Image (cartoon, helix red, strand yellow):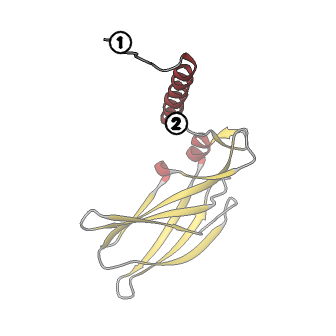
Amino acid sequence: MNIKKRGLSPVIASVLLIALALTLAMIVFLWARGFVSEQVEKDGQSTDQVCKAVDFDLEANVDKDTRIVTLQIVNRANVPIYNFDVKYIGGDGGSKLITFDLGVDVAGATDYVKIPFSDSVKEIVFYPMIMGSVRGKQVNKVVTCLDKGKTISIK
């Protein structure tokens, strides 16, 4: 009984091993890249530090008949506020996030705006947004200062 067994050529086996190693390395790289965030700065400072300096006042007039909140927003710091993320929170715990162009870009700047809301909304939270640049790139990026949000209750 003469059985001739043939295996893979050593060259093909080597190419397959290298392709497998490169594929695994790429998967690990893409997975790990999600853990490292881009460093965004404003005037040479981390946006985390700049967010701590953000200060603004909200004066709200809630009209339940027309379901409109009339706002006066005043920037109290020297940090330009680019926009605001506005989060509507319903009585059932659900929420909806919308970006509004309510920029108050210099200290003392004031903006007036009317924002509609539905019957189910119980609170509206305003989060300031600042514009920074990505370190090492010529790209601007908007950062939301989540710890500086201010809430208006709809009673």
In the rendered image, the residue lying farthest to the front is: 1
Q: Nearer the viewer, residue 23 or 40?
A: 23
Residue that numbered label 1 is attached to: 2
Q: Is residue 86 left or right of residue 39?
A: left
Residue that numbered label 2 is attached to: 30
Q: Is residue 4 above or below residue 39?
A: above
Percent position (x, y) of residue 153? Answer: 35, 67
Which of the numbered marks, if any, corresponds to residue 39?
none
In the rendered image, the residue lying farthest to the top is: 1
Q: Residue at x 27, y 62 (%)?
A: 93
Neighbour class for label 2 at 10 Å: few (<14), some, many (≥20)?
Answer: few
Task: Tell me the kind of residue under disc 2.
Answer: Leu
| Image quarter hosting the N terminus | top left
Q: Is residue 55 left or right of residue 44?
A: left
Label 1 sits on a secondary structure element that is loop
Percent position (x, y) of residue 40? Answer: 64, 43
Of the two numbered discs 1 and 2 in the rendering, the one whose residue sits closer to the viewer: 1
Query: Where on the picture, by quarter, is residue 74?
Result: bottom right
Q: Is residue 11 above or below residue 115?
A: above
Q: Is residue 61 above or below residue 105?
A: below
Q: Is residue 119 above or below residue 24?
A: below
| Number of numbered tags placed on the structure image | 2
Label 2 sits on a secondary structure element that is helix
Q: Residue at x 68, y 52 (%)?
A: 78
Q: Residue at x 61, y 57 (%)?
A: 76
Q: Residue at x 52, y 24 (%)?
A: 21
Q: Is residue 80 left or right of residue 27?
A: right
